[in-house]
Image: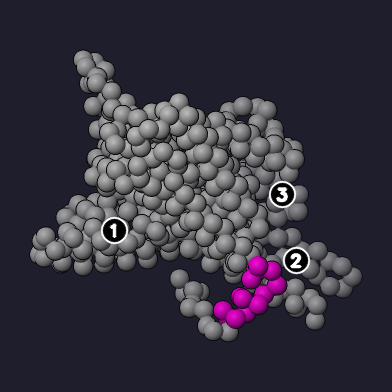
Amino acid sequence: MSGMRMPTTADLMSMWNASGLKEKLIFTFGMLILFRFGIHLPVYGINNTAFANLAAQNNLLGFLDLFTGRALGKVSIFALGIGPYITSSIIIQLMAVIVPHLEKLQKEEGEAGRRKLSQYTRIFTVILAVFQAIIFMAYLSHLPGTINPGVNHTMFYISAVLSMTAGSVLVMWMSELITEKGIGNGGSLIIFAGILAGIPLYSDRTAKLLTQDPTLIWGLVLLLIIFFITMVFIVIMQEAVRKVIIVNPKRQVGNKVYGGVNTFIPFKLNPGGVMPIIFAIAILLFPSTVLGLVGQAHLTGTAETVFLFLNKLFNPSGFWYYVIYFLMIVALTFFYASIMPNMQPKEIAENLKKYGSSIPGIKPGKPTAEALDKILTKTTFIGALALGCIALVPAFASYATKITTFQGIGATSLIIMVGVALDLINQVRTHLLARNYETFLKE
């Protein structure tokens, strides 16, 4: 925290004029503007007003709508958002741990293997998008007044599924372009832009709530204070690292001695950033979507009992939803740490042994790998619990203060926005630092 400072005018001018950064920033904002424009392109044959009113009254639909940046409520071509792509990425990454062929592509075949995995992810994204589009259209068909009269239902279903699938693929393409040619992670930034678009809705709902009950003003003040403290803890956790001291060997060349200076390996307390939260939401959205469709059917007996149980379990405003949400964040933080190249104890131990470096008091090789594994397990466990708790604090604070207009995705969005903003700032700093080194070398 002590190393962080507000950028000066000179810093901002340097950032803008730095080689390549201006173009990256313009490209990133251009893609986000294109995404926001696509949200307002409706699927043919839909009565947007009728469905938007229904989404505003239904907690589940409102939850899904906020996650897609208001695209779902408008039933636009981007109604599925980045969800299918994120879900596909999670599944492929999980399969890479289980399936030997995919594991080989990820760990042994370098860039060519990663390109193949990316291609598998894209193909599976299309499959998921088609499936989700069909479910959503079947759900709409049960709602009165959402499909315009006189529309051929067969052609409507076909065109709607194709439009929404194409829209999801286009969002995936924009996400990958931002990651490759822009600044920051494309998927995170698209979600970030969608959340920002929901802020006016939060403000409007909160204003109406205070109009109905002015005594809640102190509850709102307390909630905002809790939000501010939460943001401080998010920044601390995102920047916190566990430093493992490394002793480097001395080398004598002629009359001069090189090396021998102690360095350290920094292991982040929260290696996954906001990705475990985004992954957890994306996974939980799937059963919520399916249950929303099943709820339109007239169930009886055991089927109705099972539906009510699952609906209670995955209701975004329910207690058990937050329990599952917390456990998923913890599990996904560990999973994300396990697949990161710079957090593999065996590889780090082998590299240290190769260069003659070591951890004080620990033998090179297998003992070093075991020691690093213990350190990483403890660090990741603390980070996972902290991330899970921070994700829950704003939600429970909303219930405690009775200001429930920020519950669900509104509470989680706070962490996503701060995390994505920090990641974006760090990438800009890295770019500027690289630019300074290039200038130094030229001089």
Image coordinates of residue 408 in percent, x first then y, are 30, 48
Which one is in front, 154 or 30?
154
Q: Amino acid at mark 1?
A: Tyr
Residue 96 at x, y percent in the picture: 60, 33
Q: Secondary structure at mark 1?
A: helix
Which residue is denoted by mark 2 in the rendering?
259
Q: Between tags 2 and 1, which lies in front? A: 1
> 108 or 19: which is nearer to us?
19
Secondary structure, mark 2, is: strand
Report if residue 268 is visible in the image.
no
- Does label 3 or label 2 sit earlier along the sequence? 2
The residues bearing labels 3 and 2 have C-alpha atoms spaced at a distance of 16 Å
Give the percent coordinates (x, y) of residue 250.
Answer: 76, 63
Identify the residue shown where x is 47% and y is 35%.
160
Question: Which residue lies under the disc numbered 1?
Answer: 202
Task: Report which residue position mark 3 lands on.
Answer: 351
The amino acid type, in three-letter code, at marker 2 is Gly
Please state the extent of the stretch shown in magenta in the rendering.
Answer: 11-23
Q: Quadrant of the C terminus?
A: bottom right
